[in-house]
Structure formats: structure tokens, C-alpha cells
């Protein structure tokens, strides 16, 4: 994973202000302000029905916003023809002719889009299908079909690549293939916007994150900034289970409320407090069989900021996380 510790200094590929899409009285996308940096892989996540696909369709000119403004690659989303030639997109499942080869499918798409057909050979090799381009599409595995779809999205030699659930339905091997491909594309300078519900994959591959829920923006900024906001836990397992209650009391007495779970004591505390807990346990003649630190994950952060009942919702990353 490429971390987001360095500033996103390449400018913005996508911006929106108050972007809204209503169907009747229901706001599917509700006044979101996006800022997508250039040259990153940005994850676009949210629960089912959050408005992800609707947002992507507005950015690609497939549907009109009900309100708000936006720019893609410096051009207004009210004039998609001014930028779509520089955008590649794979929205939902790729559609190809099943009885002709992958190569021929790409050649047809290149002709229809007036793209350089000479790029087909290069793209097949780039997505790992150089030796399978002559095989008929219906013989491809799901991962191969998805990679061919990404090759089709790359035909215009885009500056921005938009992918909606590119690993949906893939087995672990297929997911790894797509992950490696996206990292390679980003390393070559392409801006990639990936919509996905697989949080583990987003955490592995993305530099930047946008979270929406119920059509509203919950967070945007560096992934590391969101994860680091989650409180770490010191996890201690005593040699004797009979010491669990005393160990939890030690944590609580030190200002880190201890709870017993799965044969261990969990205490919300910074990682550097772990050695102190070890010393406190020794003074009480408690021997620790294991001592570790459990850090927050993207999944923890996701559920925290999409739970409107009991958690603060962050609309933007803390300033230090985005610019530091």
C-alpha cells in the first residue's frame, strides 16, 4: 500500500460543490462536496444504496444532477463531452461479445470510440492477457473478463480511470490480479477512482478515501488519517485465567477501562502504554502470557463514521492528515 503521509500535491482531478440527485422527494445523493486528488488511487465506499453508483453516473454524464456543480479534469460536468475523451470507465460488469476473442472485442470498441487500434496489443499485455488475447471471451475466467474490461476502459489512454466494483464476484486470485494492475496503473501516474464494498481491499490498495452514507459525505482524505483516529487497544492475556478480573482492574485503575473478552483483557490505550501495563501486572504478581496492541482498521473506522446514532460524523479529514 502506498501511504498518504506525503501531501496530495498534484492538484484535483474531480471537484463537486453541493452535488445532488433526487428522485421525487428522495435525495439519493445529498449535496456532497468532493475533492479527488490527481495521481492517487481513491477508494469510494459506503453501504449498499449509499449513492456511490449514482454519483459516478453524474460525474460521467450518464445522468444529470438535480442541483450542485462539479468539474472533472478541469471541465464542468454540465459539458461531459469536454472531458470524457480523457476518462476511462468500467461501471458494473463489462459487456463483450462472448463468441469472439478478447482482442477482437477491444478492436471493435477501439473502432467505435475512434481510439488507436494499435493500443490493443499493448493493453492486452498490460492487463496480463497478452497470451490469451486470441481466445474467445466466453472461455475467460471472471478475473480475466474483469481485466479485459479494464483494458477497454484504458483504450482512450485516460487521465482518470473510474471503476465501479472492479473485484465484485472475483475469487482471491482474481482480486490479487486486479489489485496489482491498479497499483501499476497508479504508479504510472493515472488517477484511479475505485468504488467497492470490500474494505480490506480498499485499505490495501488505496491512498485516499471517500465515504458516503445515505447520500451524504462522511469523510474524505488520507486513509491513514481516518484509521489513526481510531483508538488503539492494548490486549493482555494472563498466564492464569483466574487473574483476568484483577488485570482488568489494573487497567481501569490506570485510566484505561479494561474489559474481558475472549480470554484477554482489552484496554483502550496508546501502544506505548503496553510496557507500563506489563510492569503494573508484575507488581501484582500477575504473569502475562501475551501482550500486544490492536490497532484500528478501516472497517472499524467505516462503521464508526456511518453510525449516525452514536458517533461523530467527519465530513473532511483533519487538516494535518491531508496536508502533512
Image (cartoon, rainbow, N blue to C red):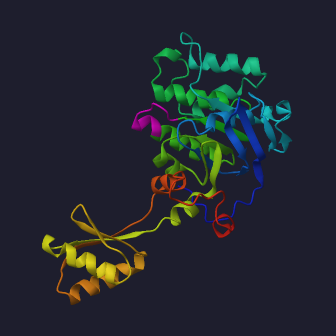
Residue that appears at 62% across and 38% down: 52
Observer able to see residue 42:
yes
Residue 38 showing in the rendered view: no
Considering every residue shown, the one lying at the far bottom of the view is 283
Residue 169 against residue 292 in the figure, above or below: above
Quadrant where the C terminus is found in the figure: bottom right
Q: Is residue 159 left or right of residue 220?
A: right
Q: Nearer the viewer, residue 49 or 145?
A: 49
In this rendering, the count of numbered labels is 0
Specify start and end residues of the magenta stretch as a single range: 167-175
Report whether 92 appears left or right of 15: left
Residue 220 highlighted magenta (yes or no): no
Give the percent coordinates (x, y) of residue 54.
66, 33
Give residue 7's quadrant in the image: bottom right
Task: Give the residue at the far top of this rendering.
Answer: 99
Vertical arrangement, residue 166 with respect to residue 120, above or below: below
> Residue 142 placed where, x, y %?
47, 26
Q: Which residue is nearer to you in this view: 10 or 72? A: 72
Of 309 and 32, nearer the camera is: 309
Residue at coordinates 76% horizontally, 22% vertically from top-left? 113
Most distant residue in the front direction: 25
- Nearer to us in this view, 107 or 46: 46
Q: Position of residue 127 (x, y in %)?
A: 57, 34
Amino acid at each position: 500500500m502506498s501511504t498518504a503521509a506525503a501531501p496530495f500535491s498534484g492538484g484535483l482531478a474531480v471537484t463537486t460543490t453541493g452535488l445532488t440527485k433526487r428522485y421525487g422527494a428522495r435525495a439519493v445523493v445529498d449535496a456532497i462536496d468532493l475533492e479527488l486528488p490527481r495521481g492517487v488511487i481513491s477508494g469510494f465506499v459506503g453501504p449498499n444504496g449509499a449513492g456511490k453508483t449514482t454519483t459516478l453516473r453524474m460525474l460521467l454524464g450518464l445522468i444529470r444532477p438535480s442541483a450542485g456543480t462539479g468539474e472533472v479534469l478541469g471541465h464542468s460536468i454540465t459539458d461531459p463531452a469536454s472531458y470524457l475523451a480523457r476518462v476511462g470507465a468500467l461501471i458494473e460488469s463489462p459487456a463483450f461479445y462472448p463468441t469472439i476473442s478478447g482482442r477482437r472485442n477491444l478492436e471493435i470498441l477501439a473502432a467505435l470510440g475512434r481510439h488507436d487500434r494499435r493500443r490493443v496489443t499493448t493493453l492486452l499485455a498490460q492487463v496480463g492477457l497478452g497470451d490469451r488475447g486470441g481466445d474467445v471471451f466466453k472461455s475467460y475466467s471472471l478475473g480475466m473478463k474483469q481485466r479485459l474490461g479494464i483494458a477497454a476502459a484504458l483504450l482512450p489512454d485516460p487521465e482518470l480511470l473510474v471503476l465501479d466494483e472492479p473485484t465484485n464476484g472475483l475469487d482471491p486470485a482474481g482480486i490479487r490480479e486486479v489489485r496489482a494492475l491498479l497499483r501499476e496503473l497508479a504508479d504510472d501516474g493515472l488517477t484511479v477512482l475505485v468504488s467497492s464494498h470490500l474494505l480490506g481491499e480498499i485499505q490495501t490498495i488505496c491512498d485516499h478515501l471517500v465515504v458516503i452514507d445515505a447520500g451524504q459525505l462522511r469523510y474524505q482524505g488520507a486513509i491513514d488519517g481516518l484509521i489513526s483516529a481510531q483508538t488503539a487497544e492494548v490486549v493482555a492475556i494472563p498466564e492464569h485465567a483466574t487473574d483476568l478480573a484483577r488485570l482488568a482492574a489494573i487497567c481501569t485503575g490506570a485510566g484505561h477501562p479494561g474489559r474481558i473478552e475472549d480470554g484477554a483483557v482489552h484496554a483502550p490505550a496508546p501502544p506505548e502504554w503496553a510496557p507500563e501495563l506489563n510492569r503494573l501486572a508484575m507488581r501484582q504478581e500477575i504473569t502475562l502470557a501475551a501482550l500486544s496492541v490492536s490497532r484500528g482498521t478501516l472497517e472499524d473506522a467505516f462503521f464508526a463514521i456511518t453510525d449516525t446514532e452514536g458517533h461523530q460524523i467527519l465530513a473532511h479529514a483533519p487538516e494535518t492528515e491531508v496536508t502533512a
